[in-house]
Amino acid sequence: TQLLEQSPQFLSIQEGENLTVYCNSSSVFSSLQWYRQEPGEGPVLLVTVVTGGEVKKLKRLTFQFGDARKDSSLHITAAQPGDTGLYLCAGAPGSNYKLTFGKGTLLTVNP
Amino acid sequence: DTEVTQTPKHLVMGMTNKKSLKCEQHMGHRAMYWYKQKAKKPPELMFVYSYEKLSINESVPSRFSPECPNSSLLNLHLHALQPEDSALYLCASSQVSPEGPQHFGDGTRLSIL
């Protein structure tokens, strides 16, 4: 059973469109992280959400943490080709160093 | 520029070879990780070192042998690998906090012939 269910797995859109990626779990997380990985590179942390109901903005990216701290979403406004990459949500449900990743969303933004 | 440096970037080896992957960080992080990543999939945890001691081994085959010589360095020794071991191997580091963000290197692309 996947601890973090991420959807959609694949998304191909045109430049200028909006999109939302979801990360859901039946478990409570004390925090969730979002990473973006571009081809040939390692994942890069975009944001960490900690407080239930929290909303964080990073330019055209908006991140939400659900009130119950079981889910999170990433919304991109007016997507650009530079947003192309693998988006990963991750959380540490336990008191060790294991970060659990969702399956990832492979986003392609076409010019 | 990534703050976690991995070498080499690419490695091609035969199934009988012995090679090592290296990882270095100078952020003062005391937790370091090895992950394996297949194309278009999330990273899969292999090993975790905390304060230079192995704290997690995710049932990784013994042909992969990690080593942490000091708080800044992490090695992964490879021997008698199989073709299915071909993947991107990522190193990461973090503060000693299970919920803290991890900083990843750009990985070593490993191909087993």
Image (spheres, coloured by chain):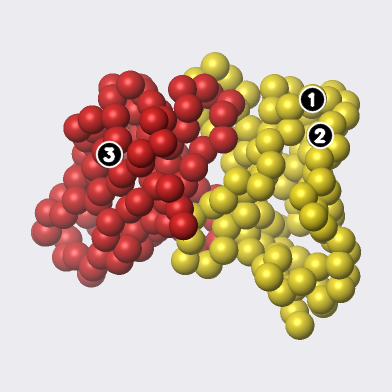
Chain colours: A yellow, B red
Residue B9's quadrant in the figure? bottom left
Q: x%, y% of residue A60?
A: 82, 58
Residue A66's quadrant in the figure? top right
Amino acid marked by disc 2: Phe
Query: In percent of the image, x 43 and y 42: which residue is there?
Result: B92
Q: Report whether A13 appears left or right of A102.
A: right
- As measured in the structure, the alpha-carbon distance from the residue carrying label 3 to the one carrying label 2 is 34 Å
- As measured in the structure, the alpha-carbon distance from the residue carrying label 3 to the one carrying label 1 is 33 Å
Q: Report whether B52 appears left or right of B91.
A: left
Q: Which mark is residue A65?
A: 2
Residue under circle 3? B74
Pick the residue in front: A78 or B53: A78
Query: In percent of the image, x 69 and y 28: which residue is there?
Result: A31
- The mark total stands at 3
Q: Report whether A3 appears left or right of B36.
A: right
Q: Residues within 10 Å of mark 2 (few under 14, many from 20)?
A: many
Query: In percent of the image, x 19 and y 32: which residue is there?
Result: B69
